Amino acid sequence: MFNLFKKVLGKTSEAIKEIMPTKRKEISKEEFEDILLEADVNYDLIERLLEPLGAKINRIQAFNSLISVFQYKADFKESEAKPYVEMIIGVNGAGKTTTISKLAYRYKEAGHSVILGAGDTFRAAAIEQLSRWADKLKIPIIATQQGHDPSAVVYDTIESAKAKKIDHVIIDTAGRLHTQTNLAEELKKMIRVAHKALEGAPHRKMLILDGTQGSSSINQAKAFNEMIGIDGIIITKLDGTAKGGSVLSIADELRLPIFYIGTGEQPKDLIKFKANEYVNTILDEIFI
């Protein structure tokens, strides 16, 4: 697991090495600030993290400072419901479809049955892409044509899961419609219909955030959270960027559970987020 965090933060580590070619037992406050800025941590957060620290910083002090960002009470929404219904939310291009395939693969590897619902009926490409993943992973999918009512897909997917006694339902949603109002109304309707098909559904609304987007992904998250209430976050594309510090900014701003980090393009490339390992992987590049 630790090596996987090293992989996902590889480019961030390279950026840190450019600032600090050699590791040391202590670094100055200014050096720590430069490192955090380079890793794309929000400047206001950096100011708060540095404020209680002295002129010289050791590893323990740096760890305590960074880990403090994750010390909020995140409501991990758990349910014993079967089927367990998850709705996957986020803007187009954040990696929704690939992440759905990763979740499906993870559940299947754990011995659970899965069905997908192609609820992004706004884009034909989204339906085709999700159908290809379902075929590749050998799992059922409920899909319709572009332009059809996504709420009907939600209802049919849950009903099919109930009839076939399937463990997990994963439903895709549209990332962008003509206006934000349209998107909000569509998502709210999908949630109402899910609850109608199965009381308590969707059990988890997961937001996919592109880790390379920095503050714009935080603004997206706030908008979706205001629309429908988000239960947790999956961060994608961190392996392709030096902005690994954006995780700190996301956690600080949103105060929501970060469930997983995407580590690549393949279905197996998804790891559970662990704050301690994330922070230590960054500090390994700084301190002896």
Image (cartoon, rainbow, N blue to C red):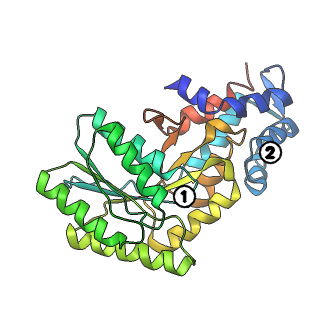
Q: Residues within 10 Å of mark 2 (few under 14, many from 20)?
A: some
Q: Of the numbered discs in the image, which one, if any, rests on residue 37? A: 2
Residue at the spot 23% in from the left edge and 40% down from the top edge: 112
Provide the residue designation for mark 1: 255
For the point 72% across and 29% down, which residue is it? 13
Quadrant containing the C terminus is top right
Q: Is residue 249 above or below residue 276?
A: below
Element type at marker 1? loop
Q: CA distance from mark 2 to mark 1?
A: 21 Å
Q: Is residue 68 left or right of residue 22?
A: left
Three-letter code, disc 1: Arg
Seen from the viewer's position, the closer of residues 54 and 179 is 179
Q: For mark 2, give the secondary structure.
A: helix
Q: Nearer the viewer, residue 171 or 222?
A: 171
Q: Position of residue 215 (x, y in %)?
A: 70, 58
Which residue is drawn at the image coordinates 62% and 46% (left, top)? 247
Q: Earlier in the sequence, mark 2 or mark 1?
A: 2
Q: Amino acid at mark 2?
A: Leu
